[in-house]
Image (tube, rainbow, N blue to C red):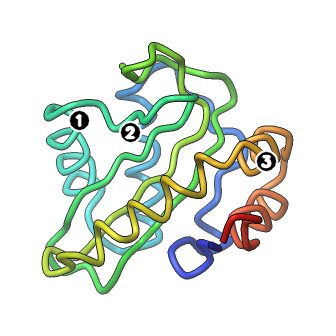
Amino acid sequence: MPLNDLVAPQAVISALKVNNKKQALQEIAARAAELTGRPEREILDVLIQRERLGSTAIGHGIAIPHGKLAKLDGLFGLFARLDRPIDFEALDGEPVDLVFLLLAPESAGADHLKALARIARLLREPDTTRLLRESSDPEALYAVLAMPTPSA
């Protein structure tokens, strides 16, 4: 199931250089703010509040930080491949190197949950995560996110 309706080519970061979870969230919030026109602080606050409920790392080196924002036009995704893995407090204890941010309007309801499920399904595909880890440029990463998966 391709994610090209959630993430645009300019919302792909191929080698994000961060040292920890907080820095990763700050950098991702900054890029999301540029692309959505929403204030960076508002995005970061939503992500930090969500992380306080429990880590959004889903295991196997993958995290899906997410939240809802007022005045957001629609679902927004941003993908980042980290330069090197970082601790994201995952339940399996593995460091995270693939991060997919999902922002949704406050009114999104079930669409937000459906999008989260789609992202999680795609990123649980071993072939997809292998390709994402092997790809080093934004265009190649976007192509992986936009291609249909074998199980779709």
| Residue 11 screen position, x and y as percent | 58, 65
Quarter the N terminus occupies: bottom right
Residue neighbourhood size for the residue with mark 1, other residues' Cα within 10 Å, grouped as few (<14), some (14–19), many (≥20): many
Please report contact status of discs 1 and 2: CB closer than 8 Å, yes or no.
yes
Residue neighbourhood size for the residue with mark 3, other residues' Cα within 10 Å, grouped as few (<14), some (14–19), many (≥20): some
Indicate which disc, 3 or 2, sits on the residue closer to the N terminus. Answer: 2
Using the image as rendered, state which of residue 108 and residue 122 is in the foreground. Answer: 122
Residue under circle 2? 25
Q: Is residue 133 above or below residue 46?
A: above
State the SS at label 2: helix
Is 100 situated above or below 93? below
| Residue denoted by label 1 | 51
Which quarter of the figure has residue 147? bottom right
Q: Position of residue 51 (x, y in %)?
A: 23, 35
Residue that numbered label 3 is attached to: 127
Q: Residue furthest bottom?
A: 73
State the mark number for residue 100.
Answer: none
Residue depicted at x 15% and y 31%? 52
Quarter of the image holding residue 39?
bottom left
